[in-house]
């Protein structure tokens, strides 16, 4: 399923579950511009595929989910404000705009721009030895308004500033305490727990999952809901999946949803 994606981005399918892997293990999955663009393109592709019900995002190997942006290209691609703006735009919005639920599977280091991916995922499962940080202050660079806003929507204002101002590494236990991750499991159980979670989501009605994700994100916007938006949840009652779910509940059978 890689299509025109770079070698640093792998996309695999197992039934209704897609997996996107940042595939630069020798670089601890540092994200260069080509990889960032490919990551966005991969999520654009999956978002358009109605046969997908959930996506797992992970880094290759066991040492790192990712260590952020690839600093080795900063001197050529991020050496002045104009270049920095172009560099940021190159990362794209594919992950942020994905319609399907996205689970981040976190092992090892989750640093900088890789941590910055987490607010655009829906669930985050980490191994107990995972380490987190945003070391921007140690590099003399600044997170922008949009990135800070996303982080503050996931965790509190005070905890976001703690991460940004201290620029220090912290544990998976601390990440769980401040709400950065949903759960922490033993390192050798991360993959099993992540895909078990994905299977549970995939077994449910995909239209319901997409609507729930859409509505939850819309509610982050303080603007009042329109009349049309308030009516949209009622659309589920006209779907085939609703009829399937209702029949399965009445007959005590497992529903086989079709996404229609």
Image: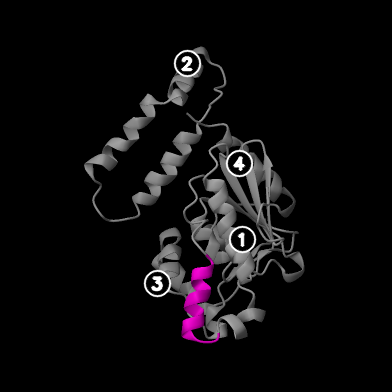
Report the residue marked by disc 3: 145
Closer to the camera, 139 or 69? 69
Q: Is residue 10 left or right of residue 170?
A: right
Q: What mark, if any, has residue 38 been given in the picture?
A: 1
For the stretch drawn in magenta, the main secondary structure is helix
Q: CA distance from mark 4 to mark 3?
A: 32 Å
Query: For the magenta stretch, what is the residue range?
Result: 79-91
Task: Determine if residue 127 is in view.
Answer: no
Report the residue marked by disc 2: 247
Contact between marks 3 and 1 (CB within 8 A): the answer is no
Q: Residues within 10 Å of mark 4 (few under 14, many from 20)?
A: many
Q: CA distance from mark 2 to mark 3?
A: 48 Å
Q: State the residue at coordinates (40%, 72%).
A: 145
Q: State the residue at coordinates (55%, 57%).
A: 176
Q: CA distance from mark 4 to mark 1?
A: 23 Å
Q: Residues within 10 Å of mark 2 (few under 14, many from 20)?
A: some
């Amino acid at each position: 399923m890689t299509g025109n994606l770079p070698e640093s981005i792998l996309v695999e399918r197992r039934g209704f579950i897609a997996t996107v892997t940042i595939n630069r293990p020798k670089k601890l999955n540092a994200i260069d511009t080509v990889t960032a663009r490919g990551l966005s393109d991969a999520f654009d592709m999956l978002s358009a595929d109605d046969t997908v019900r959930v996506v797992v995002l992970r880094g290759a190997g066991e040492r790192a989910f990712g260590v952020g942006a690839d600093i080795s290209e900063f001197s050529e691609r991020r050496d002045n404000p104009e270049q920095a703006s172009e560099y940021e735009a190159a990362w794209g919005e594919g992950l942020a705009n994905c319609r399907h639920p996205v689970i981040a599977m976190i092992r090892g280091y989750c640093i900088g721009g890789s941590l910055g991916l987490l607010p655009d995922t829906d669930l985050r499962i980490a191994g107990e030895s995972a380490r987190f940080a945003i070391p921007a202050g140690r590099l003399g660079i600044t997170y922008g308004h949009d990135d800070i806003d996303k982080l503050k929507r996931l965790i509190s204002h005070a905890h976001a500033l703690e991460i940004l101002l201290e620029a220090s590494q912290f544990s998976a236990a601390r990440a769980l305490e401040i709400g950065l991750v949903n759960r922490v499991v033993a390192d050798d159980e991360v993959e099993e727990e992540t895909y078990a979670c994905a299977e549970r989501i995939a077994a449910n009605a995909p239209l319901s999952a997409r609507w729930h994700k859409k509505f939850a994100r819309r509610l982050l916007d303080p603007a009042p809901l329109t009349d049309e938006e308030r009516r949209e949840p009622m659309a589920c009652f006209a779907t085939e999946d609703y009829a399937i779910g209702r029949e399965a509940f009445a007959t005590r059978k497992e529903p086989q949803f079709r996404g229609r």
